[in-house]
Amino acid sequence: MISIIIAVLVSLLAGGFIGYAVFRYVVTGKYKQIIDSAQKEAEVVKEKKLLEVKEKFLNKKSELEKEVQQRTQKIQVNENRLKQREITLNQKQDELGRMKHDIDQYQVQVDNERKVLESRKAELEKMQEQERTKLEELSGLSAEEAKNRLVESMKDKARMDAASYINEVVDQAKLDANQKAKKIVIQTIQRVATETAIENSVSVFHIDNDEVKGRIIGREGRNIRALEAATGVEIVVDDTPESIVISAFDPVRREICRLALHQLVADGRIHPARIEEVVAKVKKQLENEIIETGKRTAIDLGIHGLHPDLIRIVGKMKYRSSYGQNLLQHARETANLCSVMAAELGLNPKKAKRAGLLHDIGKVPDEESELPHALLGGKMAERCKEKPEIVNAIAAHHDEVEMQTLLAPIVQVCDAISGARPGARREIVEAYIKRLNDLEAIAMSYPGVTKTYAIQAGRELRVIVGADKMTDDESTKLSNEIAEKIQNEMTYPGQVKITVIRETRSVAFAK
């Protein structure tokens, strides 16, 4: 049994030794293979890297050779340029040398000629002296005396020639000035020609259908009466299809009524309370539109820095007329005429245009005044910090004050040009408007009167009085007094109907 165990152990030991020997032999063989393979790969990588390094070296060498070649070429070019410049400078130096030699020769020649001239000049002076001596002996006068006599005779002749020349120049200047002035005026009129526009005393309000007419009239005419009382116009609703006529001599009243009618018809609510509300709102809108018109006019004409009050007054001109001519159009036309004429005369066209636009601002004052419109306009411009030459041009354009600058006669002439064109104005329209204004002024002069409106082309005067300031009997008496005063103080065709309206209103607020 023991021998068997020993035999097994020996067998195991022998098998282990043999296995170890075999394993070591196999591992050693594989290790050698791996080492050989790695060495071969290393050799390949080494050769590859060497080739890359050689290639980079060759590329760098090629680049450096190119750079060296380029620099060599640049240096060669610069050397060629320097050589060329050196050759040019040498040529110029040679040329300068030749020129200097020529100049030296010319200078010698000039010196010789100067000497000859000086000798001849001395001979000439000697001969002149001899001639002078002979002349003095023959004439019995010294040279100074002869000179003085000759100068005096020349002076007399020069005076006569100068006087004759001055007279000719003055006559020619007067003729040329007259022709030049006519030419300037004609050219100015041609360059600023505008269409003639005559203001009407009626406006037409167009409606979509005739059913709206009944709503505007209202029950028993209360709506139309309220609208006429609030705006001071006469509204004519007749058989004319799809139109209502608004009649009033004041364009502002007509415009207020037209805009109010437009809003009322668009809104659909037409009754006396709504009418008064809309009319008040339209008056504010029209005031804003007046200011916008003034600003737009100033911008169109290139006039800057106008006082806000003057801008508003210029806007109001749109709704005023002078002898039937729209006042804003007249002012714009006068401004353009002044600008062109001032430019032709070599003056400041901007100042002339400014004075031309503002020359009639006295016709649209906020408060009535007894002053002529030119003087009133001058005071208004002065109050608004306008320059003295502008103020003088406004105040003097009707010769009510002395003209102090050339701007004033230019404004005067251009105002006349604008107003004197055929068809530009109608005296009858101005007289008609003045008669209506006088009618309203007579009624407003009585105490208790709050509003007055001349309607129907001046054939009717409506006078609104305060109910708390006058009784019914007093209102009847007032109508008779106004009629008697109009009859005694005014001239008018036909007859004038005076209607005194006394309203009682009770207002309360629910809170």
Image (cartoon, rainbow, N blue to C red):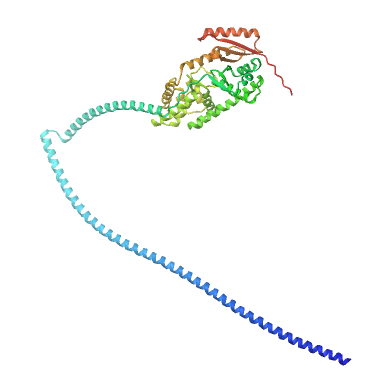
Q: Which percent across, then down, holds residue 51?
A: 54, 75
> In which quadrant is the C terminus drawn?
top right
> In which quadrant is the N terminus drawn?
bottom right
Residue 390 in the figure: left or right of residue 270: left
Q: Residue at x 56, y 8 (%)?
A: 483
- Observer-nearest of 90 and 199: 199
Which residue of the protein is positioned furthest toward the bottom in this rendering?
A: 3
Q: Is residue 111 above or below residue 417?
A: below
Q: Is residue 137 above or below residue 450?
A: below
Q: Is residue 27 something that shows in the picture?
A: yes
Q: Which percent across, then down, holds residue 125?
A: 16, 43
Among the 4 quarters of the image, the one containing residue 187: top left
Among the 4 quarters of the image, the one containing residue 276: top right
Q: Is residue 388 something that shows in the picture?
A: no
Q: Which percent across, then down, holds residue 50?
A: 55, 76
- Observer-nearest of 163 and 456: 456
* Count of numbered circles on the image: 0
Q: Which residue is drawn at 53% across and 75% down?
A: 54
Residue 186 in the figure: left or right of residue 269: left
Q: Which percent across, then down, holds residue 349?
A: 43, 31
Residue 179 in the figure: left or right of residue 433: left
- Observer-nearest of 245 and 301: 245
Q: Residue at x 27, y 26 (%)?
A: 167
